[in-house]
Amino acid sequence: MMNYSFIRAICALIIGLVLVIWPDLAVVYLVITIGILFLVPGLFGVISYFANKSNQTSRNFPIASIGSVLLGLILVIVPALFVDILMILLGIVLLLGGIQQLYSLFTARKWTAVPVGFYVLPLLITIAGVFILFNPTDARNTAFIIIGASGIVYAISELINWFRFINKKPKTPVTTDIVDAEIIDE
């Protein structure tokens, strides 16, 4: 059975490899892709409003669709404008990913021993996320290589954790809280 940890690890590995191999192009194409994701639905909204002339009096003017088209055009035409924002978002993703992995390891301690070495990589991923958040402009290409490398490390760490701890997870939930134990006993 495939679970979200495995899928998350594979996605992080692919994104990490792309960012390490092609940091300049990956950033530009990612922003352009986001622009297209705003542009296409916006165009459909505007076109469907004007194509259906019989309902124009009863329907609201598609302001949100026009805004989506304009934002999409800006992202497609001037992708470098939004690279710093994108870097901050990717830094946040790394930060949250590292924290989530640390939390998962702390949770796994409820049913099995977790060696200290397993905490090193998630901690490094968290530190990389913080570094990127505080240095988005200074090291644009370097930061994307760091994000990519951290994504690869995160993916490998997630896969190791998944393979190491999935068989040891109990079939029934482990309770450590007194309130939970009292509810189960009743």
Image (spheres, grey):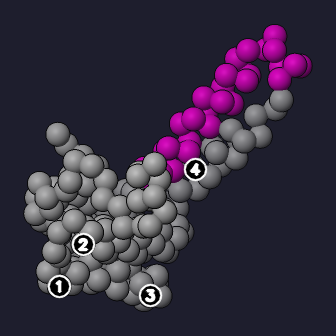
Residue extent of the magenta highlight: 31-59
| Drawn side of residue 87 relative to residue 170, left or right | right
The x, y position of residue 175, in whole percent, is: 35, 61
Query: 171 and 15: which one is in front?
Result: 171
Task: Tell me the CA gap for discs 3 and 1.
Answer: 29 Å
Q: Nearer the viewer, mark 2 or mark 3?
A: 2
The x, y position of residue 115, in whole percent, is: 14, 80
Residue 140: mark in rendering: none
Query: 84 and 91: which one is in front?
Result: 91
The x, y position of residue 23, in whole percent, is: 28, 70
Task: Tell me the CA gap for discs 2 and 4.
Answer: 49 Å
> In the orientation shown, which residue stands out farthest toward the front?
186
Q: Earlier in the sequence, mark 1 or mark 2?
A: 2
The reply to whether residue 34 is visible in this rendering is: yes
Task: Tell me the CA gap for discs 4 and 3.
Answer: 27 Å
| Drawn side of residue 68 relative to residue 179, left or right | right
Quickly name the residue at label 1. 116
Using the image, determine if residue 27 lies above or below residue 63: below
Quickly name the residue at label 3. 135
Give the main secondary structure of the magenta stretch.
helix
Q: Nearer the viewer, mark 4 or mark 1?
A: 1
Q: Earlier in the sequence, mark 2 or mark 3?
A: 2
Quickly name the residue at label 2. 109
Q: Residues within 10 Å of mark 2 (few under 14, many from 20)?
A: few
Q: Secondary structure at mark 3?
A: loop
| Drawn side of residue 75 relative to residue 128, left or right | right
Q: Earlier in the sequence, mark 4 or mark 1?
A: 4
Using the image, determine if residue 153 lies above or below residue 31: below
- Residue drawn at the location 17% of the way across and 39% of the way down: 1
Q: Nearer the viewer, mark 1 or mark 2?
A: 2
- Residue drawn at the location 17% of the way across and 76% of the way down: 114
